[in-house]
Amino acid sequence: MTKDPITIPLDCTIDEAAQILLEHKLSGAPVVDDEGQIAGVITQTDIFRGLVLFTGVKKAGIQFAFQLEDRPGSIKEVSDIIRNYGCLLVSILSGQDVQAGYRRVYIRVRDCDPERLEELKEELKAKANVLYVMDHAKRNKQT
């Protein structure tokens, strides 16, 4: 055992724990309370389980990937279009590791009317930079 191991505080969020594990190139670490007592262990598998839960990937559905301006309201604009077509939003993830002033946004939905999907895609393309649309049930990715 390591004499002074890297630990994860009990009140740490899953994304904070993932950052610590990644930063220190660890596959897992003990979780400790305020007194330094071990409350459990968090592993990469726990992080992956959280990722699957947060993204809604188990629900299949359709994922829209965008590159949007990094400004207030840009995500709402595309999500409102999607909701107007009766789709149920499952998850919205975004990140800023792209061109300055832009962000990548991934919106997963389900219960979309397949008859109106092409119309929805065209409306989204007219409003935003759509990187791809992935129908997970059909394993079909369109750019």
Image (cartoon, rainbow, N blue to C red):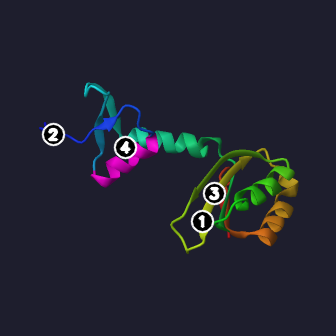
Q: Is residue 24 magenta?
A: yes
**In percent of the image, x 60 and y 72: which residue is there?**
101
Q: Quadrant of residue 64?
A: bottom right
Q: Nearer the viewer, mark 1 or mark 4?
A: 1
Q: Earlier in the sequence, mark 1 or mark 2?
A: 2
User: The C terminus lies in which quarter of the figure?
Assistant: bottom right
**In percent of the image, x 60 and y 41: which residue is there?**
58
Residue type indicated by callout 3: Tyr
Residue that badge 3 annotates: 106
- The residues tagged by marks 4 and 2 sit, at their Cα atoms, a distance apart of 20 Å
- The residues tagged by marks 1 and 4 sit, at their Cα atoms, a distance apart of 26 Å
Residue 4: % across, % down = 15, 39
Mark 3–mark 1 CB contact (< 8 Å): no
Decide: is 29 above or below 67.
above
- The residues tagged by marks 2 and 3 sit, at their Cα atoms, a distance apart of 39 Å
Q: Nearer the viewer, mark 4 or mark 2?
A: 2
Does residue 69 appear to the left or right of 9 in the view shown? right
Q: How many neighbours does mark 1 have within 10 angstroms: few (below 14), some (14-19), or many (20 or more)? A: many
Q: Which mark is residue 103?
A: 1
Residue 59: % across, % down = 65, 41
Residue that badge 4 annotates: 44
Residue that badge 2 annotates: 4
User: The N terminus lies in which quarter of the figure?
Assistant: top left
Q: How many neighbours does mark 2 have within 10 angstroms: few (below 14), some (14-19), or many (20 or more)? A: few
Residue type indicated by callout 4: Gln
Q: Earlier in the sequence, mark 4 or mark 2?
A: 2
Q: Earlier in the sequence, mark 1 or mark 4?
A: 4
**In percent of the image, x 55 and y 39: which residue is there?**
53
Q: Which residues are magenta?
A: 14-25
Residue type indicated by callout 1: Arg
